Image: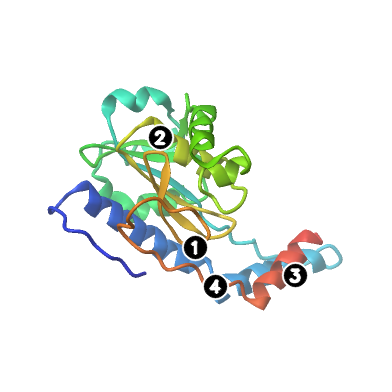
Amino acid sequence: MAFRRMKQKKGSSQGLLLRTVKEIDKIRKEHYGLTYDCKHAAASVSRVFGRFVSYVQFDTPKKPAYLVLLGMPEENLKDTHNGVTGMATKYLGKPFARVMPQLLKDIGNCDGAVVVDNAGKVVRVGAQLINLDTRGLLKERKREYGKQENPARLLGFSEEVGTRHTSAIVASYKHQGIKVVTLSEETGDIRIYENGRILASTNTKDRVHGKRRLTIKPPEPSSPLEKIAELATISI
C-alpha cells in the first residue's frame, strides 16, 4: 500500500487513521488473492462431492469485513448499541493502537462497528449504529448533484453497496469530524469517510471528495480460480 502523508503531529488522529488502514490492508491481503481462491475452490468442490461420498469436507474461509469509527465524542455514544459483549470485555477501555491487530482479527467475521473515542480508546465492539438520517444526507446530495443519480451514486459509491457502507458514510455525516474506515467483504475495497463524503477509496470509480490525504492501491483483479470458486459456490 502506498501512502501520501500530510504533515501531522506525532500521536495525532491522522496517525491512528493511517495505522488502521495499514492494518486492515494487511488483513485484506491475507484473504484476497490466489491463496484464498485455492482454499475457497477446494471447499466448494469438497461440499459438492460430499453429497455423494463420505469424507472430511473443508470449511469455506470467510472474508473479513470492517466498520471502524475513529474519534467518536463521548456524548455521541448514545447513538450506538453495544454488540459483541463477551468478546468486547477484553478490549473496552484499551488503546486501539495497542490491541488493533488482535481485535480486528477477532471481529472480522462479526457484524457491527468498532468505535474508538477521542482519546484513542476502544469504547464499542460489534456496535449497532442508530439514529442515522440517510434521507437527510441524500436530500443534501440531490441539491448538489441533481436528482437523476441513484442513491448509491449520490452518496459517492460507484455501485450499489450494503448496509455497512451506507451506515459508515451517514455516520460520518452525523458525527462531523470523525473518521470512518470500511472494508468490503464482497469486493475487498477499503474506503475512508469524513463529513458524509468518501475521503479515499481503493475503488477508482468512487467519487472521492477534496484533496486525497492518502492513496490506497486497489486490490488485485479477480483470478480465474476465484471465478470458478464463485460458480462452484452458486451451484451448491
Residue 45 disc label? 3
**Foreground label between 3 and 1:** 1
| Residue 230, picture quadrant | bottom right
Report helix, strand or loop for mark 4. Answer: loop
Q: Image height check: is 15 above or below 118?
A: below
Q: Are marks 3 and 1 in contact (CB under 8 Å)?
A: no
Residue lying at the far left of the rendered structure:
9
Q: Disc 2 designates what residue?
A: 173
Report helix, strand or loop for mark 3. Answer: helix
Residue 170 in picture, x, y percent from top left: 46, 35
**Foreground label between 4 and 3:** 4
Q: Toward the viewer: 70 or 29?
A: 70
Give the amino acid at mark 3. Val
Identify the mark nearer the N-term, 4 or 1: 4
Q: Quadrant where the C terminus lies?
A: bottom right
Q: Disc 1 designates what residue?
A: 204
Identify the mark nearer the N-term, 3 or 1: 3
**Foreground label between 2 and 3:** 2
Identify the mark nearer the N-term, 4 or 2: 4
Q: Residues within 10 Å of mark 3 (few under 14, many from 20)?
A: some
Residue 154 vs residue 229: left or right? left
Q: Image height check: is 142 above or below 109?
A: above
Q: Residues within 10 Å of mark 2 (few under 14, many from 20)?
A: many
Residue 172 vs residue 97: left or right? right
Give the amino acid at mark 4. Gly
Give the amino acid at mark 1. Thr
Residue 33 disc label? 4
Residue, x 18% and y 49% (percent of image)?
12
Give the amino acid at mark 2. Tyr
